Amino acid sequence: MTKVISVDPNKPFETLREELKSVAKAILDGALVAFPTETVYGLGCNPFNKKAVERLYEIKNRPKGRPLPLLVISQKQVEVLTAEISDAARALMEHFFPGPLTLILKRSKVVPDEVCAYTEKVGVRCPKHNIPLALIDACGVPLATPSANLSGHISPTDAGEVLRQLGGRIDFVIDGGRTSIGIESTVIDMTVEPPKIIRLGSITPEEIEAVIGKPVEVDEEAMAARYRPLHARIVLVDVENEEERINALIESAQKHLGEGARVCLLATDETITLLKRIGVPSGVVLRSVGSRHDLDKVALYIYERISASDREGFDTLIVEGFQREGIGIAIMQRLSSAAHEIIKRMAP
């Protein structure tokens, strides 16, 4: 049985640390605990407890070849976990820690082989959220923490989604409310030259380049992970021209309705206004994901909307695409990975 503990992340740090002492002890003894970060909910365990690490892999159905990132509370912990830190990596830590950036560095012998999947690298991140920071402080060790989802499925942004995917299989869920960003951290490999982004998040390549003063690569192939809901089929309408995009949304809805599917169309406020004016096929449910002019909010809500629509039993989710700028790049990378079908037309 999974125990749910509600915690107010806005309490003073020492109060949080005291409240989480019993959970920290359970982690040290091998418990698996889900908790919020600023990005998504994570599933944490003691990286030095071999049985806990093995259980985490098993419960998530995570491939054994994928290392577990470590959440830390300070750069001092990073020093212990790594064998080498370049000037560029230090600059990124100074600028983005705590925050939604995971650095892949050369590991030290302190890091167990099981955690880093028998590689010579380790991913480290300092979250910008008091709950994991208080937990790490109370534990006295970093936490091995991938996202709190079944491998390949959408990462939870609230405790309810964690329970839907992992309830009854993990020991604790700390409910600290909805996460503030809604997509996973940017991950950059600092052991290669030039540094290589292997997962896009809210921190963009341009922001990283501005800090380290040199270009970075984006590894498109490494980011081909799947982000799919549990049941529904996702159709991504990735069309630049507004008129063509509206037509493609309507045509796709008509097609799937004709095949007997229950259809939910997820789009921006602006597009929904136009669709209501034009008229959508009877039976299509419209659901907003926010304004096209505020992609930070879209990132926060779109995956929750997809997950909620999936739970409601829709067969097909038709999702409007976004401009590939700033955080929109990360949103589209995940949507493209999740999509079973992508409708793409060139703008005139």
Image: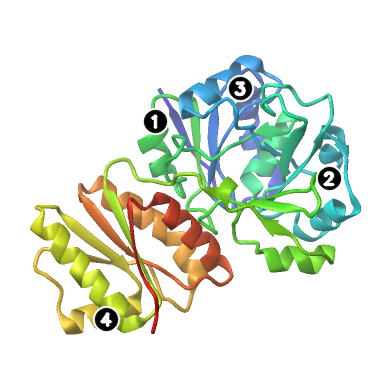
At x 76% / y 54%, what residue is drawn? Answer: 97
Upstream in sequence: badge 2 or badge 1: 2
- In percent of width and height, residue 236 lies at 34, 61
What is the crowding at mark 1: few (fewer than 14 residues within 10 Å), some, or many (at least 20)? some
* Tag 1 residue: 167
Upstream in sequence: badge 1 or badge 4: 1
- In percent of width and height, residue 68 lies at 64, 33
Q: Secondary structure at mark 3?
A: helix
Figure check: 324 above or below 21? below
> CB of mark 3 within 8 Å of CB of mark 1?
no
**Mark nearer the viewer, 3 or 1:** 3
Give the distance between the C-alpha atoms of the residues marked 3 and 2, in whole angstroms: 23 Å
Upstream in sequence: badge 3 or badge 2: 3
Q: Name the amino acid type tagged 4.
A: Thr
Give the distance between the C-alpha atoms of the residues marked 2 and 4, in whole angstroms: 48 Å
Give the distance between the C-alpha atoms of the residues marked 2 and 1, in whole angstroms: 33 Å
In the image, which disc is placed on residue 75?
Answer: 2
> CB of mark 1 within 8 Å of CB of mark 4?
no
Q: Quadrant of the C terminus?
A: bottom left
Report whether 180 appears left or right of 335.
right
Figure disc tally: 4
> CB of mark 2 within 8 Å of CB of mark 1?
no
Residue 252 appears in which quarter of the rendering?
Answer: bottom left
> CB of mark 2 within 8 Å of CB of mark 4?
no
Give the distance between the C-alpha atoms of the residues marked 3 and 4, in whole angstroms: 48 Å
* Tag 4 residue: 273
- 199 or 239, nearer to the observer: 239
